[in-house]
Image (tube, helix red, strand yellow):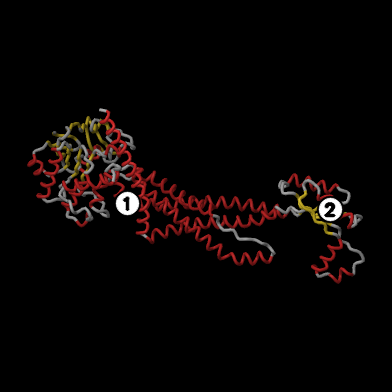
Amino acid sequence: MTMKRQTHSKHVGQRLLEKFQAYLLNHAHGLFSSLGRLSRAPVTSSMTILVLAVAIALAGCFYIVVVNIQQLTGNLQASNQMSLFLIDSVNEAAGQKLAEQLARHDHVENIKFIGKTQAMDEFKANSGFGEALNALESNPLPNVIQVLPKNVLDDRVALDALMAEFRQMPQVEFVQVDMQWVERLQAIMRIANRGVTLVGVLLGFAVTFITGNTIRLELHNRQDEVFISKLVGATHAFIQRPFLYTGFWLGFIAGFSAWLIITIMLLIVETPVEQLSGLYNSSFQLLYLSFSEFVLLLMLASGLAVLGSWAVLHYQLRQIKPQ
Amino acid sequence: MLRFEHVCKRYPDAGDALIDVSFRLARGEMAFLTGRSGAGKSTLLKLIAMMEQCTRGNVMLDGKDITRIGEGRIPYLRRNLGLIFQDYKLLNDRTVFDNVALPLIVSGYSHQDIARRVRAALDKVSLLGKEKKHPLSLSGGEQQRVGIARAIVNKPKMILADEPTGNLDPDLSAEVMHMFEQFMQVGVTVLIATHDIELINRLGHRVLTLEHGRLLAG
């Protein structure tokens, strides 16, 4: 009796295992047969994939451009430099002393003192007004202390407080922070960021609908197969599986192609960009999509494509009924 | 095995297709369903195959009420049925083997089981050796036998055939009918819609006759 039950349970376990293996096999079959089906209609498939790839690449290019510009403004943010212009009655030695004093301030990272003589020499050398400046009786340039605040002062309020503190010092005539244009640039970048999101969402919709429509046509072409499968007892899950895999492949291959397109475009602009940055003495390095961004791109592209396919299948499969 | 109780089917635009139809089929019984075109034969078969739902009455299949059944359960109940069509309904881009294997793949049978059962089914319809052919390279009679093999490969409790001999010559028709009788003998319920009166009379099984949606005899 017990032995019989044992063999029975073993049998049930084996059957379950076989069912599971058959299920996996069915998935594997769906995965590869859908790829085979795509390759058997190369023109149609590649046109769809190309349309998808261009849509994805468009969003991706916009994104990578913004990322690269952000890289620039990121560097700017780190240099919220202030210039303290000292009053005339403070001579260079006193200015130097003040600078040393300020260097010990809690919120100050670095100090650079530019004495009026030094400033005059640089100005003569660089401005081209050398001769004219020689005609001046006295040096009209002020002594300047350049202050680099600590990085902790990223927020505007703390920075303003530090500015106010410097402004109250008797030796300081006025304080100048070249923040305004940085702020404007950052505001523009916020808009650009939002723009990337919007364009991304829009093109994401495009990918979803294009794939959905492709799957709808495919479903229409294979109506007989769907109908017959239904009649021999196929569940919707079974019937839609190969179509979902087709959607997956469309998205996946399109995502990969989009990555190729983006990379090739970056390669094309890399040299001129580096020449430009060289002109500005900048060490700007063009950023490409990172590996995790590449993986995300693939996942998004195939995910959206599967979503579009699934939505279409969900509604259309119920409608395919025998005539 | 099959029970119709006061079944009515009305189509919104075509009117009444079936009116107050009641009958029973026992397990292992074989019956013909006959009547003119438009008498409701196809509608009756569609109700059993769960392709349509009746407007009134009840349909019981193998002790289960399939009258108003949830969409999700239909596939599992259909696996108890073997359907055979006048136009065969084969997938012409797949081999004979793949066509016959479809009900098994759908039900999640293992690879070895599928191969064994498909061969057994093809053997029953004498098509062993043509597994690798495509349906369109076969004759009409052979294609119909592929359809029959597909219908029996899952060992269904009931076989429904809609004009199975409609496209076949008398010899082939007799051959197909002989197969159905064999299935009946192993306990399968068989319902065949046909208007081949001569064939019906010769075989002498039970006959259900429909006229304008009503069941006349049976």
Quarter where residue A314 is shown: top left
Name the residue located 84 percent from the left edge and 52 percent from the top edge.
A100
Question: Which residue reaches farthest top?
Answer: A1
Q: Earlier in the sequence, mark 2 or mark 1?
A: 2
* Residue A223 image offset from top left, x and y in percent: 31, 50
Q: Nearest the camera: A241 or A180? A: A241
> 10 Å neighbourhood of mark 2: few (<14), some, or many (≥20)?
many
Quarter where residue B25 is shown: top left
Residue A88 appears anywhere in the view = yes
Q: Which numbered mark, 2 or 1, is in the foreground of this view?
A: 2
Q: Are marks 2 and 1 on the same chain?
A: yes
Q: Which residue is the site of mark 1?
A: A222
Residue B148 appears anywhere in the view = no
Name the residue located 43 percent from the left edge and 52 percent from the top edge.
A211
* Residue A161 image offset from top left, x and y in percent: 78, 45
* Residue B177 image offset from top left, x and y in percent: 12, 44
Label 2 and label 1: CA atoms lie apart by: 81 Å
Q: Which mark is residue A175?
A: none
- In the visual, does B75 lie left or right of A129? left
Marker count (numbered): 2
For badge 1, the amino acid type reads Arg
Quarter where residue A60 is shown: bottom right
For badge 2, the amino acid type reads Ala
Q: Nearest the camera: A127 or B2? A: A127
Of helix, strand and loop, which one carries label 2? helix
* Residue A98 image offset from top left, x and y in percent: 86, 52
Compared with A119, A82 (above or below) is above
Q: Which residue is the site of mark 2?
A: A99
Q: Mark 1 belongs to which subunit?
A: A
